[in-house]
Image (tube, helix red, strand yellow):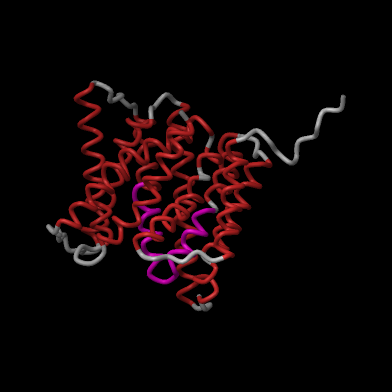
Amino acid sequence: MNLFLYLLTVIIWGTTWIAIKLQLGVVAIPVSIFYRFALAGLVLFAGLLLLGKLQKLDRRGHLMCLGQGLCLFCLNFLCFYTATQWIPSGLVSVVFSAATLWNALNARLWFGTRVAPRVMLAGALGFTGLVLLFWPELASQQASHETLLGLGFALLGTFCFSTGNMLSSLQQRNGIRPLTGNAYGMLYGAAILLAGCVATGQPFRFDTSTPYVGALLYLAIPGSVIGFTAYLTLVGRMGPARAAYCTVLFPVVALSVSTYAEGYQWTMPALLGLALVMLGNLLVFTKWTPFARRAVA
């Protein structure tokens, strides 16, 4: 079951970049993000209500969902979209891959969970692999004030993502299932986005073209309702650090799709990077660890 949820998350989130690209243009980015999570939250909330699966939350539960909505369905997306205005998407992907390490460290701080050496090694291998995969983009990026701003927003977005993971893990430890937590979290996140858009005077345009509407539906239902539920279920079942290795595989899936959709050319450094990412994935899903001592007969 874990492997199925893992692959489902990687495939869905590894292809959402196509839908995100189709949304750029007529509608302001914060407004598009609001549309996405408002639709996703309403669909999920209504579905759970009709099926009688929506849990009742106390004040503490609502506060956890509010925090999750702020971190996971609002701030991290705003940070990543903003970062891509100043630095290449490949560099954003490399920074985001550090979520594995962030989650391991935060799980230690929040819950006292021991940081498994193999998970840290897997994260380091995945990070190195992504650097090789995106090396042409990284090498062409010149240091500047804008670059530092972009890196800062990417790091902040990754931290918000990790904090949202911790809040989801806390919810599940308190008996709140991911579907209910996501339904409330997405609606809270959408409400915060709405308030921010109104406060900053963002125009609420809507693009009725087929590509935009199709992208919105894909991002809201598979990308948010299914993707986030699968991923946060993994956070509860596997632990935040192992589940977050998905963030290393998203760019690999995206580049694989780009090979056919945009003619991406694989190079030797890119292939070596892919091998390192796969090795890191092996460490995440197996019990083998190079740090374990062999038993002496």
Q: Quadrant of the C terminus?
A: top right
Q: Quadrant of residue 186?
A: top left
Residue nearer the viewer, 184 or 96: 96
| Residue 92 sits above or below residue 224 on the image | below
38 horizontally vs 77: left or right: left
User: Is residue 194 among the parts visible in the rendering?
Assistant: no
On the image, the x and y values in percent for residue 36 come to: 25, 49
Query: Residue at horizontal 49%, vertical 39%?
Result: 166
Q: Quadrant of residue 209?
A: bottom left
On the image, the x and y values in percent for residue 40 come to: 25, 42
Query: Residue at horizontal 61%, vertical 53%?
Result: 276
| Residue 126 sits above or below residue 5 on the image | below
62 horizontally vs 1: left or right: left
Question: Which residues are drawn in magenta?
Answer: 73-97
On the image, the x and y values in percent for residue 264 come to: 42, 65
On the image, the x and y values in percent for residue 25 come to: 23, 67
| Residue 57 sits above or below residue 282 on the image | above
219 horizontally vs 143: left or right: left
Residue occupying the far left of the picture: 208
Residue 88 magenta-highlighted = yes
Residue 89 magenta-highlighted = yes
Residue occupying the far top of the picture: 52
Query: Residue at horizontal 34%, vertical 26%?
Result: 58
Q: Main secondary structure of the magenta part?
A: helix
User: Is residue 145 among the parts visible in the rendering?
Assistant: yes
Residue occupying the far right of the picture: 297
Query: Residue at horizontal 31%, vertical 24%?
Result: 55
Total number of numbered discs in the rendering:
0
247 horizontally vs 47: left or right: right
Residue nearer the viewer, 68 or 179: 179
